Image (cartoon, grey):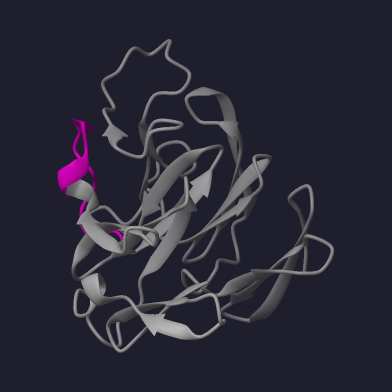
Amino acid sequence: LIASAGGKLYKSDTFRTMVQETSAASDFESGRLFTGAEWNQKLYIADPSKGLFIYDPVADTLTDWAAAVTGGTAPSGCNIVARYRDAMVLAGDPSNPQVWYKARNGDPLDFNYGADANDATRAVAGNNSEAGQIGEPITALCPYSDDYLVMGATGSLWVVRGDPASSGIIDVLANNVGILGPRAWAYGPQGELIFLGVNGLYLLAPGALAEG
């Protein structure tokens, strides 16, 4: 278990006690929300004020994710990260709030969007909108296993089925409700997605069929 408080990272030890991680003692701004997603036993962190980080709980190291990128350039300013189909997906860039960024499948250090178009695992970026319109700011990324990824926006709800770089499908689920923020959602006991919108709580049943 990894948690944050007061700008510091903590993890549970063998005695189930929360212990402060010394290498990450003051790398985050107290009171600011950031998100993280696990991949290969490491935590990939998106902090809008400090940047992107990789936390290794075994080595107790916090490294600069953007500086470690080996292909392309990692997006900046993102405060939302999720793992979907073995790929890291980022959103919340204040300069491009409607855009999402997916790293290469199986390689969170590859953001080369110019790779071969026939490469089904390549990094891709996009935005969710009706034809001819600019998408709304993305507020949440909610992965459901490898089946689909729900993207919440300020006033709409979208679902990605499959891989965006390999015949994946992006559909709008609702044009009149969104998700308030990166952590304004949770999974229910039957796998349903429960989220908070402007007008109250909503439920998205497994299979991405909306119920209100």
Quarter of the image where one finds residue 45: bottom left
**Residue 37 within the segment the image draws in magenta:** no
At 36% from the left edge and 30% from the top edge, which residue is drawn?
Answer: 123
**Image quadrant where one finds the C terminus:** bottom right
At 26% from the left edge and 61% from the top edge, which residue is drawn?
Answer: 61
**In this picture, is 102 found above or below 113?**
below
Between residue 64 and residue 85, name the one nearer to us. 64
For residue 71, side relative to residue 199 (left or right): left
At 26% from the left edge and 28% from the top edge, which residue is drawn?
Answer: 112
Quarter of the image where one finds residue 205: bottom right
**In this picture, is 3 found above or below 30?**
above
Quarter of the image where one finds residue 108: top left
Q: What is the magenta range?
A: 67-78
Between residue 70 and residue 72, name the one nearer to us. 70
Q: Position of residue 129 (x, y in %)?
A: 46, 44
Q: Position of residue 94 (x, y in %)?
A: 24, 61
Extreme residue toward the right, this view? 190
**In this picture, is 126 found above or below 188?**
above
Is residue 137 visible to the viewer in this orientation of the structure?
no
Total numbered badges shown on the rendered structure:
0
Is residue 5 visible to the viewer in this orientation of the structure?
yes
In terms of secondary structure, what is the magenta stretch mainly? loop
For residue 121, side relative to residue 208 (left or right): left
At 25% from the left edge and 76% from the top edge, which residue is drawn?
Answer: 22
Between residue 175 and residue 137, name the one nearer to us. 137
